[in-house]
Image (cartoon, helix red, strand yellow):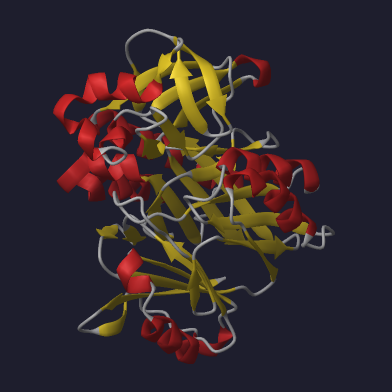
Amino acid sequence: MKVEQRRWASKEGWRPYSLDSIGDSAQLVLMFGSGSAIKRPEPAERLKSLYPAAHIIGCSTSGQILGARVFSDSITATAVQFERTHISLAQVRINEVHDSHEAGGALASAFEHEKLAHVLVFSDGLRVNGSELVRCMWETLPYGVAVTGGLASDGLRFNDNVVCLDGEAEEGKIIAVGLYGENIKTAFSSRCGWYPFGIDRVVTRSSGNELLELDGKPAYDLYAEYLGELADEMPATASLLPLNLRIETEGLDLVRAAVAVNKDRRSLTFAGGMPEGATARLMRGSAERILKGAADAARGLQKSAGGKPAELALIVSGTGRKVALGQRVEEEVEAARDELGDKTALAGFYSYGEISPVSPHAPYEMKNNTITITTFLES
């Protein structure tokens, strides 16, 4: 595997970010950018000329990760040349949240399952119930095939977001890349770093990923009480108070962050399902805990590849983490790099939801305010 990286800025265009040059040998380019930048046609058109044989996929983000840097208003590109790995692409459209389960099944069924080793997913972040999307993928894909990736985002605006395929940036799209063969080795890990506070509350009324009531009281009112004068800025400020969601019937302990509010219904909509009967606690983060979570997520990933440095690491981190870290946001990527080593190329983005299995061979899940790292190595 060979990796070449570039960064685009409005005044400069595409500039090399690494010394490698693979050009028309690349089969895949991962492109992440701010919502306003990635919707422009010129950057993707120029990438097509630089990598004419590659599929260009990606999404809008709340921040772009390239090396140990984090950018907020640019586009990053990571071109990959696989030497012994075959790739396949699939896409579906999604218009309504309640179509998420069906979309996951259609996406997983689009792949030839024989020799499928790993699937990367990039999804619209506002029209999807991420947990239903990946649940059906788990039910459909062969046992042992892991799915990682994330939901598109657009900072704290929560208005629109896009997913990109070969130059077309569209809302309501989900794209997946299947990696095939015995030579591709992947590993993944996910950590949080936020901690719960206050009392346990029960989800007493919900509809899919819309949370209506906790302990019989409107969910919006609870958040408004804790946020005070910042309540009018929800859902942006709600990202600082995610929920620790414990689903006893499934043995899951997850983090959920709000992506929309409805004042008339006194509700909040989250990126993943909010089942009735689940136990929820508010959470808060500190920079030290968040940075420790990044280091913990990266630690040990190299061991899964027999001690060899991964050639590429895809980092998908929650938008709330970027907000909480503020000017220290690059320290999160540096913490991961310190564990992965300088020989691993880093790429990624800040998302509205992170996708990974809870543990190897466990069901996939959509999480919030976590950092999920997937490493890639060809043997």
Of residue 187 and residue 49, the one placed in the foreground of this image is 49
* Residue projecting furthest to the top: 199
User: Looking at the image, is 214 positioned above or below residue 318?
Assistant: above
- x and y percentages locating residue 93 in the rendered image: 63, 62
- x and y percentages locating residue 54 in the rendered image: 57, 81
User: Looking at the image, is 374 positioned above or below residue 172?
Assistant: above
**Is residue 117 found left or right of 308 in the rendered image?**
right
Query: Which residue is pictured at 30% across the width and 52% down the height?
Result: 157
Q: How many marks?
A: 0
Of residue 345 and residue 202, the one placed in the foreground of this image is 202
Query: Which residue is pictured at 52% across the width and 73% down the height?
Result: 2
* Residue projecting furthest to the front: 264
User: Looking at the image, is 174 positioned above or below residue 360?
Assistant: below
Of residue 114 and residue 151, the one placed in the foreground of this image is 151
**Is residue 369 found left or right of 376 in the rendered image?**
left
Query: Which residue is pictured at 72% across the width and 43% down the height?
Result: 136
Query: Which residue is pictured at 77% across the width and 62% down the height?
Result: 110
The image quarter containing residue 223 is: top left
Q: Quadrant of the N terminus?
A: bottom right
- x and y percentages locating residue 6 in the rendered image: 36, 76
Of residue 245 and residue 98, the one placed in the foreground of this image is 98
**Is residue 305 found left or right of 335 in the rendered image?**
right
Q: Can residue 28 be seen in this view?
A: yes
* Residue projecting furthest to the right: 114
- x and y percentages locating residue 302 in the rendered image: 52, 47
Q: In which quarter of the image is the C terminus?
A: bottom right
Q: Is residue 303 visible?
A: no
